[in-house]
């Protein structure tokens, strides 16, 4: 069976998604990937006369759209598994969680109930999510409704929708935000670079920066619409010389995804693969019993087009760690005023998870 990676390209209105699909096709076909595109479901339905204003209620429409989105993705995955190729990249023009931005919380819960699906499983079922920020934020002169018959938002509405879409995906382990800090061509190149990093292309490494912060106000974080809580357990495995291996489970309220991470030493290049629950349980038998499990609560926060991951550990009462992936190492980090930074610890090995596992 081929190696299959499924990603979402999302974002606010007039963010460049259509152009991005062409860039992705050209870039990754040349790298040996078979690239499959799952078309945007809302555009298909609205263009065919099925819309929130033609159905009985918005809820009736959203049930149809989410149901069709899930079935389309299942069909593409089923077809991909039969293809006699080595590497397949499935690109979803918006994913299931995009629909959350177009509903009330009660409507979204009812859609999940009717379709018998779980929000976390749907969100984390993608290998990565790339959010292109609407041109209405920072590139207003290029914002237009002329190139999409299903687009109707004003600049103000586009900005608000962009915020809701980003909040819907907040909590995903590989969410990347591509803003309008550069011109459009560089924006597309940044997107290709971020996808390449997720695919583990040679020469591309995460630009992750880590900060020691004062213990955050947990109750306030949990009240923010742009913040999601995730529970994580990481277990280090017996590893050959020159490698560091761990498995993890990530999720909430009994709904988890599982993964294995391999870190090549001393360069620190990491690769990650998804596991089934059974594969995860099997690998736990290889645990390095000289090290403790690392248990932490992660608060995923989107703030001014940045994506922070705040890790709170049970053995720390006065401090925590905050991490951010940088699309440009020279970019300034804009911390929320409620995050108080003690210092940057990116290059301090004692704050890596392996060090925090300590000796059992």
Image: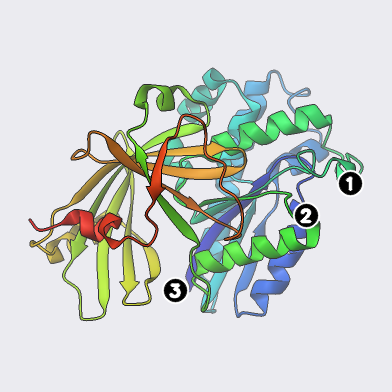
State how far apart marks 1 and 3 are (Cα).
Answer: 38 Å
Residue at point 62%, 24% (across, down) = 103
Q: Is residue 113 above or below residue 139?
A: above
SS class of the residue under badge 1?
loop
In the image, 99 versus 1, the foreground residue is 99
Q: Is any atom of residue 117 visible in this view?
A: no
Q: Quadrant of the N terminus?
A: bottom left
Crowding around mark 2 (Cα neighbors within 10 Å: few <14, some 14 to 19, many 20+) is some
Q: Is residue 30 above or below residue 331?
A: below
- Residue drawn at 48 percent across, 64 percent down: 206
Mark identifier at residue 134 = none
Q: Residues within 10 Å of mark 1 (few under 14, many from 20)?
A: few
Residue under label 2, please give it. Answer: 18
Which circle's residue, 2 or 1, is located before the other in the chain? 2
User: Which image quadrant for residue 264?
Assistant: bottom left
Give the label on residue 147, or none.
1
- Label 1 or label 3, whichever lies nearer to me, is 1
Res 136 quadrant in image: top right
Q: CA distance from mark 2 to mark 1?
A: 10 Å
Could you tell me which residue is drawn at 42 percent across and 22 percent down? 220
């Amino acid at each position: 069976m081929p190696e299959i990676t499924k990603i979402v390209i999302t974002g606010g209105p007039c963010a460049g998604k259509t152009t991005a699909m062409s860039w992705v096709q050209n870039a990754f076909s040349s790298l040996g990937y078979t690239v499959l595109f799952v078309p945007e479901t809302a555009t298909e339905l609205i263009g065919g006369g099925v819309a929130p204003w033609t159905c009985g209620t918005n809820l009736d429409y959203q049930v149809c759209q989410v149901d069709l989105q899930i079935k389309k993705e299942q069909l593409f995955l089923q077809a991909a598994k039969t293809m006699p190729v080595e590497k397949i990249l499935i690109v979803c023009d918006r994913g299931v969680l995009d629909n959350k931005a177009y509903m009330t919380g009660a409507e979204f819960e009812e859609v999940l109930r009717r379709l018998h699906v779980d929000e976390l499983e749907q969100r984390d079922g993608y290998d990565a999510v790339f959010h292109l920020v609407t041109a209405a934020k920072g590139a207003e002169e290029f914002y237009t409704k002329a190139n999409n018959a299903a687009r109707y938002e004003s600049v103000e509405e586009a900005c608000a929708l962009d915020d809701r879409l980003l909040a819907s995906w907040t909590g995903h382990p590989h969410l990347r935000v591509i803003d309008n800090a550069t011109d459009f061509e560089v924006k597309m190149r940044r997107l290709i670079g971020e996808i390449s990093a997720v695919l583990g292309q040679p020469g591309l490494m995460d630009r992750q920066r880590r900060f020691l912060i004062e213990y955050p106000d947990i109750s306030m974080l949990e009240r923010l619409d742009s913040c999601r809580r995730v529970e994580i357990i990481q277990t280090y495995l017996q590893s050959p010389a020159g490698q560091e291996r761990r498995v993890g489970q990530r999720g909430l309220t009994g709904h988890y995804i599982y993964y294995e991470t391999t870190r090549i030493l001393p360069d620190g290049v990491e690769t990650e693969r998804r596991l089934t629950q059974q594969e995860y349980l099997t690998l736990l038998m290889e645990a390095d019993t000289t090290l403790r499990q690392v248990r932490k609560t992660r608060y995923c926060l989107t703030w001014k087009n940045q994506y922070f991951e705040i890790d709170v550990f049970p053995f720390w009462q006065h401090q925590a760690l905050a991490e951010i992936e940088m699309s440009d190492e020279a970019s300034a980090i804009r911390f929320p005023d409620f995050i108080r930074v003690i210092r940057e610890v990116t290059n301090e090995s004692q704050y890596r998870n392996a060090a925090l596992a300590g000796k059992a």
